[in-house]
């Protein structure tokens, strides 16, 4: 059996056609191993972007890739550069070798000769923005007071804001008011739930800032 370690670098660009930001692959890097994890071959390639004419500032700073490089065919670079696809794939190989003698890795390897591999590779993570979606766990839409533990009563209808569902709540026991926010992010393996509550405090001079708590749960 041979193994392939693949790493991708992405650029976030705004698509005027889709009217939203999309992640576009700008570099491939791969290392192919034999059954004993010896390197058989390597591969690296930059990909000319079709959507973004400029690189996202954070991506440019992180990867050190320039838009000029992406417009050229084939480009050499040092393996020591961090956050370049081939260098990251090679680093993953080192990590893999370090743990291979401690536990079997077969259960962690995705076989490229089955349809699930390609379904996973092409799946796009996305936020669920319809509260009636069957994958929205309704139990995640209820909150409890962090001080007294009492249940909260929802005061307003749910509204969508920054890909999160938001509403105001009041504690049935102590009367404190909160804004509750819940985000559901669909991944290939399930839905990641992010919950946050922010206490609503009337604005007063020299008043303490709002208390904010956050919990993350993945199902």
Image: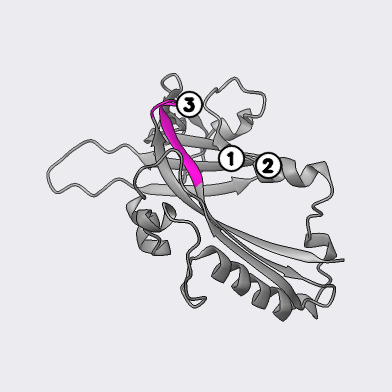
Is 142 placed left or right of 115 in the picture?
Answer: left
Per the image, the residue denoted by label 1 is 125
Looking at the image, residue 53 lies above or below residue 10? above
Q: Which residue is mark 2?
A: 188
Q: Secondary structure at mark 2?
A: loop
Residue 169 seen anywhere in this rendered image of the structure: no
Q: Position of residue 180 (x, y in %)?
A: 44, 35
Residue at x 55%, y 71% (from the top left corner)? 87
Who comes first in sequence, dot 1 or dot 2? 1
Marks 2/3: CA distance?
Answer: 33 Å
Q: Nearer the viewer, mark 2 or mark 3?
A: 2
Residue under pointer 3: 153
Which residues, given as a range, are shown in magenta? 16-24
Sequence order check, earlier mark of 2 and 3: 3
Residue 191's spot in the image, x, y percent?
A: 64, 39
Asked whether the beta carbons under mark 3 and mark 1 sit within 8 Å of each other, the answer is: no
Q: Is 114 placed left or right of 67 in the picture?
A: right
Q: CA distance from mark 1 to mark 2?
A: 7 Å
Task: Find residue 88 and report its horizontal and vertical position in percent.
Answer: 56, 68
Residue 112 is inside the magenta segment: no
């Amino acid at each position: 059996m041979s193994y392939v370690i693949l790493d991708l670098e992405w650029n976030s660009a705004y698509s005027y056609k889709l009217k939203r930001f999309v992640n576009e692959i700008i570099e491939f890097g791969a290392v192919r191993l034999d059954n004993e994890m010896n390197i058989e071959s390597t591969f690296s390639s930059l990909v000319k972007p079709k959507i973004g004419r400029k690189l996202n500032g954070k991506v440019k700073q992180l990867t050190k890739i320039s838009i000029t490089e992406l417009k050229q065919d084939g480009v050499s670079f040092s393996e020591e550069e961090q956050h370049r696809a081939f260098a990251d794939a090679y680093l993953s190989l080192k990590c893999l070798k370090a743990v291979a003698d401690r536990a079997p890795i077969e259960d962690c390897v995705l076989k490229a000769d089955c349809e699930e591999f390609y379904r996973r590779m092409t799946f796009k993570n996305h936020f669920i923005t319809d509260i009636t979606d069957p994958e929205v766990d309704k139990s995640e839409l209820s909150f409890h007071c962090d001080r007294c533990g009492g249940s909260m009563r929802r005061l307003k209808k749910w509204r969508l804001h920054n890909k999160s569902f938001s509403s105001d709540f009041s504690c049935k026991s102590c009367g404190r008011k909160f804004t509750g926010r819940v985000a559901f992010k669909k991944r290939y393996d399930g839905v990641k739930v992010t919950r946050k509550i922010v206490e609503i405090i009337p604005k007063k001079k020299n008043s303490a800032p709002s208390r904010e708590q956050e919990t993350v749960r993945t199902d």
